[in-house]
Amino acid sequence: MRLSDEKITHLTHVALRGLLQKGVISLSGEEGQIRRQMRRVIIKELKIAEDIDKAVREKLHSYSKKIPEGSAEWDVLYRKFFREELVRHGRI
């Protein structure tokens, strides 16, 4: 999933503000530096999700029986393979 730079920046502001308001964290560093690190993590995770999506789609397209994208069977297999890839990448 692609997010614009503005959306990622907005997410970091909202997330950091929410964590501070709920008292989940307290700042020990400069807020801008913390948001930049959050931004790097978000971008990294989105890249991993894109790579997993690509691998899952390639796997589904490699089947000799063509499964129409969006069909119930395709959705079930996509979710199954996506989860397997998440486990393989250590995300679950």
Image (tube, helix red, strand yellow):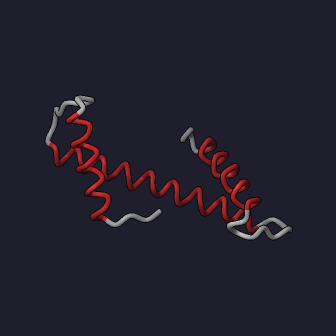
Pick the residue in front: 72 or 33.
Answer: 72
- Is 62 situated left or right of 82 in this image? right
**Which residue does the image show at 69% across and 51% down from the upper left?**
81
- Is 62 situated left or right of 7 in this image? right
Q: Outermost residue toward the right?
A: 64
Count of marks overlaid on the render: 0
Pick the residue in front: 92 or 67.
Answer: 67
Q: Quadrant of the C terminus?
A: top right
Name the quadrant containing residue 25: top left
- Is 63 situated left or right of 30 in this image? right
Q: Is residue 5 above or below residue 15?
A: below
Name the quadrant containing residue 91: top right
Q: Outermost residue toward the left?
A: 30
Q: Outermost residue toward the front?
A: 72
Q: Is residue 22 above or below residue 6?
A: above
Can you give x and y, in whole percent of width and height, for residue 76 in the image?
A: 72, 54
Can you give x and y, in whole percent of width and height, for residue 9 in the image?
A: 26, 57
**Which residue does the image show at 21% across and 43% down from the upper left?**
17
Can you give x and y, in whole percent of width and height, for residue 33 in the image?
A: 19, 46
Can you give x and y, in whole percent of width and height, for residue 41 in the image?
A: 37, 48
**Which residue does the image show at 27% across and 50% down from the upper left?**
12
**Which residue does the image show at 14% across and 42% down from the upper left?**
30
- Is 18 situated left or right of 53 in this image? left
